[in-house]
Image (cartoon, rainbow, N blue to C red):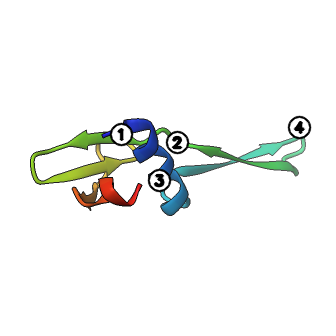
């Protein structure tokens, strides 16, 4: 199983889970620009399933091992 392909699949399917909004403000507090950054997924491959998280304390997204055939 190629982890790069799995990472691409997760970032494509679960876009909102793995993105973070940052707001850039000027000296007066007015919003200048909004920037959306992607968060690196944490992938753990278990015997029966695959767990994907956006940080170490987050609840995992549990994927079946069959996802390997879809990718």
Question: Nearer the observer, disc 1 or disc 3?
Answer: 3
What residue is rendered at 45% in x and 43% in y?
A: 5
- Determine which of the numbered discs, if any, sits on residue 9 in the image: 3
> Nearest the camera: 36 or 24?
36
Secondary structure under the numbered disc 4 in the rendered image: loop
Calculate the distance from the C-alpha at mark 2 to the C-alpha at mark 3: 14 Å
- Determine which of the numbered discs, if any, sits on residue 42 in the image: 1
Calculate the distance from the C-alpha at mark 1 to the C-alpha at mark 2: 9 Å
- Determine which of the numbered discs, if any, sits on residue 34 in the image: none
Q: First in sequence, mark 1 or 3: give its number.
A: 3
- Few, some or many residues within 10 Å of mark 3 (<14, 14–19, 20+): some
Q: Which residue position holds label 2?
A: 39
What residue is rendered at 32% in x and 57% in y?
A: 69
Calculate the distance from the C-alpha at mark 4 to the C-alpha at mark 2: 28 Å
Question: Where, quadrant-wise, is the N terminus in this rendering?
Answer: top left
Q: First in sequence, mark 4 or 2: give its number.
A: 4
**Looking at the picture, does residue 39 appear above or below residue 11?**
above
State left or right for residue 59 relative to residue 34. left
Question: Nearer the observer, disc 4 or disc 2?
Answer: 2
Secondary structure under the numbered disc 3 in the rendered image: helix
Calculate the distance from the C-alpha at mark 4 to the C-alpha at mark 1: 36 Å
Tell me whether the residue at label 4 lies in contact with that at label 1, contact meaning CB atoms closer than 8 angstroms: no
State left or right for residue 5 relative to residue 25. left
- Few, some or many residues within 10 Å of mark 4 (<14, 14–19, 20+): few
Tell me whether the residue at label 1 lies in contact with that at label 2, contact meaning CB atoms closer than 8 angstroms: no
What residue is rendered at 82% in x and 44% in y?
A: 25
């Amino acid at each position: 199983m190629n982890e790069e392909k799995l990472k691409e699949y997760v970032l494509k399917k679960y876009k909102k889970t793995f993105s973070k909004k940052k707001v850039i403000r000027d000296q007066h507090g007015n919003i200048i620009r909004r920037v959306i950054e992607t968060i690196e997924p944490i992938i753990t491959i278990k015997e029966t399933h695959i767990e994907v998280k956006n940080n170490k304390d987050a609840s995992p997204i549990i994927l079946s091992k069959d996802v390997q055939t879809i990718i």
